[in-house]
Image: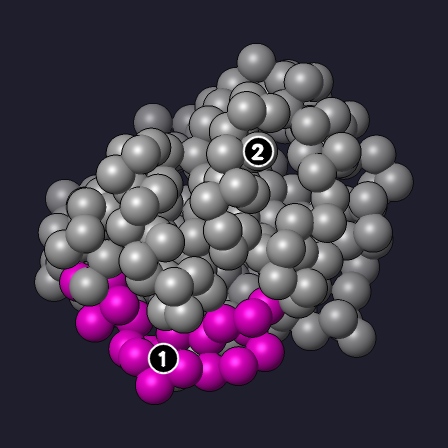
């Protein structure tokens, strides 16, 4: 199972939010590329980058920083946040990004997602950020009427193979991931699932690993790494 460090970008810096709220921000570094290099040095095999400014603005806002991150490491990087047209997808892939995560677009522009999947295959990943089982959009600011499971099934029909699932109420809280919802999503849809939101300990990672049989292939860890509650080398050992 992959343990994937998260690098959240806001105004060019590496930050963490609690429950996606801008008024609950902690700044961890002015140099996200250095953070990326450090995670690679400690053994990370994949990185997860979120353009928070882009998520709220509806278009990527940290392209130069993302380019710097991709250029600074040899491991693959996946990026999400504000990617809502094919041009942005192409730009990111041309920068060397390995996978692009589409969230809001899956609800507001499913035809665009279909075209992206037809053109780029498994480089397109569905991002579902859920609050109380419902998918949220526009930087988590707006809750849709679509359930996480229904959205995943709709996107599976157009060829999506993988989903990053985040429970918003857990994200940045260190309260533990929503294992029940994550497992259900994997079992019901048959998609490959990457769990996100709330990881606080090695025990959490062990519990996510137990869901590998259901199709959970990875877990994204953010605040727990930055706060020192989880040591990356230990987490990688636990994940195998």
Residue 78, given in percent of the width and then of the height, sits at 50, 36
Instruction: Inspect the magenta stretch and tell me whether residue 136 lies in it.
Output: yes
Instruction: Inspect the magenta stretch and tell me whether residue 44 lies in it.
Output: no
In three-dimensional space, the C-alpha distance between marks 2 and 1, rounded to whole angstroms, equals: 30 Å
Q: Residue furthest right?
A: 30
Q: Does 224 sit left or right of 134 as displayed?
A: right
The span picked out in magenta is 133-153
Disc 1 on helix, strand or loop?
A: strand
Residue 186, given in percent of the width and then of the height, sits at 19, 56
- Residue at the spot 70% in from the left edge and 38% down from the top edge: 63
Q: Is residue 181 above or below residue 146?
A: above
Q: Could you tell which of marks 2 and 1 lies nearer the N-terminus?
A: 2
Disc 2 on helix, strand or loop?
A: helix
Q: Which mark is residue 134?
A: 1
Residue 67, given in percent of the width and then of the height, sits at 69, 28
Residue 208, given in percent of the width and then of the height, sits at 32, 50
- Residue at the spot 21% in from the left edge and 72% down from the top edge: 150
The residue tagged 2 is 91
């Amino acid at each position: 199972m992959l343990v994937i460090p998260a690098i959240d970008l806001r105004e060019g810096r590496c930050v963490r939010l609690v429950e996606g709220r801008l008024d609950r921000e902690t700044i961890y570094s002015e140099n996200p590329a250095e953070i990326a290099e450090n995670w690679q040095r400690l053994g990370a095999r994949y990185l997860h980058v979120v353009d928070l400014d882009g998520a709220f603005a509806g278009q990527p806002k940290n392209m130069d920083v993302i380019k710097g991150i991709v250029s600074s490491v040899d491991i693959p990087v996946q990026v999400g946040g504000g990617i809502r047209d094919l041009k942005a997808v192409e730009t990111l892939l041309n920068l060397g990004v390995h996978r692009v995560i589409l969230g809001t677009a899956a609800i507001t522009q499913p035809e665009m997602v279909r075209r992206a999947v037809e053109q780029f295959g498994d480089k397109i990943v569905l991002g579902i950020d859920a609050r109380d089982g419902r998918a949220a959009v526009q930087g988590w600011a707006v809750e849709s009427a679509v359930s996480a499971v229904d959205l995943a099934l709709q996107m599976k029909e157009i060829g999506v193979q993988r989903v990053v699932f985040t429970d918003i109420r857990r994200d940045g809280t260190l309260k533990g991931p929503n294992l029940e919802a994550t497992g259900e999503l994997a079992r019901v849809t048959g998609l490959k699932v990457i769990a996100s939101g709330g990881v606080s300990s090695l025990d959490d990672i062990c519990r996510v690993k137990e869901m590998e049989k259901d199709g959970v292939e990875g877990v994204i860890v953010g605040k727990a790494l930055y706060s020192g509650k989880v040591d990356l080398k230990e987490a990688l050992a636990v994940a195998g």
